């Protein structure tokens, strides 16, 4: 039995991870969980999975949970230790009984906790993009130093991980990440300025959180995945290619030097890559997800149209320049996406804010997690300032 800690238990990935735990009864024990502010859902999770340690976003949320659990009729054990904030999530990530940590929080809140888990010798199932986008070199250095495994949960990187089992690294010509193209694949650039948050959140294939759905609409999500692939698979940018595949049936591919291409196909169901990451190196039978072959009529592929998705280009340029730029890219994107959802920015304003931040962020070396967090904080400051300036101009 594997013992796991979950960072982000009430989010989309966290909930689907618990679906996997339920479907493979007896294979996993959830020893610790960290969540945000959904106190009622956390209470239900505590009653069902009985973690030993639990952390919430704030002290107020922790107190609310304590009151709720004291009157919960389905608890069979004493209350878990209930913590909050950064210290709490770090305690969950480094719980001594955990073998594997699912890192599925949104934002850099899970960065230090995930890094500390690696330093404690925990294997990582990674669903938090920020960990490698912001701190890829630092984190992968720790993975190598501690000799742990870091398995990607993102469907694209999970697919590449599976395909790479079919050949040696020296035989790889390039990695091919597939992108759905998002809701604006066929929308002319001239009409993007009038896009609403509701339209941008209408992803054609996947059900995801708000930020990642907007990132899919701008193709920033694919830019992040290029950066992640560089660190996960030790592959230079020129060997990482992106194609638009509207059906999202082929999650990604690996092209080898002899012309052979291995592709991983599967349903648009995140429980599949989660299960792979948790059970690796074994493959375990599942009755919860399967590809609907009769519904698969065609497989289409397109090149990413040049000039349409500015965020995607900014991500590749940030990777080329390195240093604090990938970290700043992520931080500025988070601020700009939130501003768009609050209608403080138009859709193209997301890229404009990010580009301005990348121009202004001080260049420095990223050697420690503290260096990364300092760059993150400065990028957020610059992004908020830029949003405020642009919002003021729009009102005037």
Image (tube, rainbow, N blue to C red):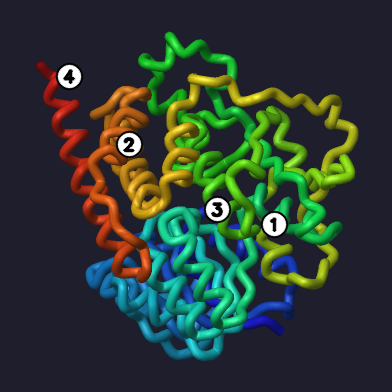
Of the residues under marks 1 and 2, which one precedes in the sequence?
1
Residue at x-position 48% and y-position 43%:
212
Residue 240 x/y as whole percent: 64, 43
Of circles 1 and 2, the one toward us is 2
Residue at x-position 38% and y-position 60%:
38
Residue located beneath label 1 in the image: 273
Of circles 2 and 4, the one toward us is 2
Give the SS element for disc 2. Answer: helix
Real-space Cα separation, disc 3 to disc 1, in angstroms: 16 Å
Q: Residues within 10 Å of mark 4 (few under 14, many from 20)?
A: few
Of circles 4 and 3, the one toward us is 3
Give the SS element for disc 4. Answer: helix
User: 383 or 110, which lies in front?
Assistant: 383
Residue located beneath label 3 in the image: 228
Which disc, if any, is residue 394? 4
Residue 20 x/y as whole percent: 68, 64
Give the SS element for disc 3. Answer: helix
The relative height of residue 40 versus residue 240 in the rendered view (above or below) is below
Q: Are discs 2 and 3 less than 8 Å apart at CB? A: no
Q: Residues within 10 Å of mark 3 (few under 14, many from 20)?
A: many
Which disc, if any, is residue 354? 2
Of the residues under marks 3 and 1, which one precedes in the sequence?
3
Of the residues under marks 2 and 4, which one precedes in the sequence?
2
Residue at x-position 32% and y-position 36%:
354
Which disc, if any, is residue 262? none
Give the SS element for disc 1. Answer: helix
Real-space Cα separation, disc 4 to disc 3, in angstroms: 35 Å
The relative height of residue 160 versus residue 138 in the rendered view (above or below) is above
The relative height of residue 257 versus residue 126 in the rendered view (above or below) is above
Residue 92 x/y as whole percent: 44, 79
């Amino acid at each position: 039995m594997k013992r796991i800690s979950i960072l982000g238990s009430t989010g989309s990935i966290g909930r689907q991870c618990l679906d996997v735990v339920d479907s493979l009864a007896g294979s996993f024990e959830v020893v610790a969980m960290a969540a945000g502010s959904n106190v009622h859902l956390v209470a239900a999770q505590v009653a069902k999975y009985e973690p030993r340690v639990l952390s919430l976003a704030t002290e107020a949320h922790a107190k609310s949970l304590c009151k709720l659990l004291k009157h919960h009729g389905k608890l069979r054990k004493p209350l878990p230790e209930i913590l909050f904030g950064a210290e709490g999530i770090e305690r969950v990530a480094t719980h001594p009984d955990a073998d594997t940590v699912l890192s599925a929080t949104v934002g850099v809140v899970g960065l230090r906790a995930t890094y500390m888990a690696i330093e404690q010798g925990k294997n990582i199932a990674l669903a938090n993009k920020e960990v490698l986008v912001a701190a890829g070199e630092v984190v992968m250095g720790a993975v190598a130093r501690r000799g742990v495994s870091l398995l990607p949960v993102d469907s694209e990187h999970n697919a590449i991980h599976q395909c790479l089992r079919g050949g040696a690294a020296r035989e790889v010509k390039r990695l091919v990440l597939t992108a759905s193209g998002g809701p604006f694949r066929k929308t002319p650039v001239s009409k993007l300025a009038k896009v609403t948050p509701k339209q941008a959140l209408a992803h054609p294939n996947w059900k995801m959180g708000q930020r990642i759905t907007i990132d899919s609409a701008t193709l920033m999500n694919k830019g992040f995945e290029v950066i992640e692939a560089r660190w996960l698979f030790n592959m230079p940018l020129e060997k990482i290619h992106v194609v638009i595949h509207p059906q999202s049936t082929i999650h990604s591919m690996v092209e080898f030097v002899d012309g052979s291409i291995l592709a991983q196909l599967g349903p648009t169901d995140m429980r599949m890559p989660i299960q792979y990451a948790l059970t690796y190196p074994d493959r375990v039978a599942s009755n919860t997800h399967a590809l609907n072959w009769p519904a698969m009529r065609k497989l289409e592929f397109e090149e990413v149209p040049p000039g349409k998705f500015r965020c995607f280009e900014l991500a590749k340029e940030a990777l080329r320049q390195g240093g604090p730029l990938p970290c700043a890219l992520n931080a500025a994107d988070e601020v700009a996406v939130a501003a768009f959802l609050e209608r403080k920015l138009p859709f193209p304003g997301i890229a404009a804010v990010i580009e301005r931040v990348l121009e202004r962020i001080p260049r420095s070396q990223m050697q420690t997690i503290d260096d990364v967090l300092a760059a993150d904080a400065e990028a957020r400051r610059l992004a908020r300032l830029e949003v405020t300036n642009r919002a003021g101009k729009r009102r005037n």
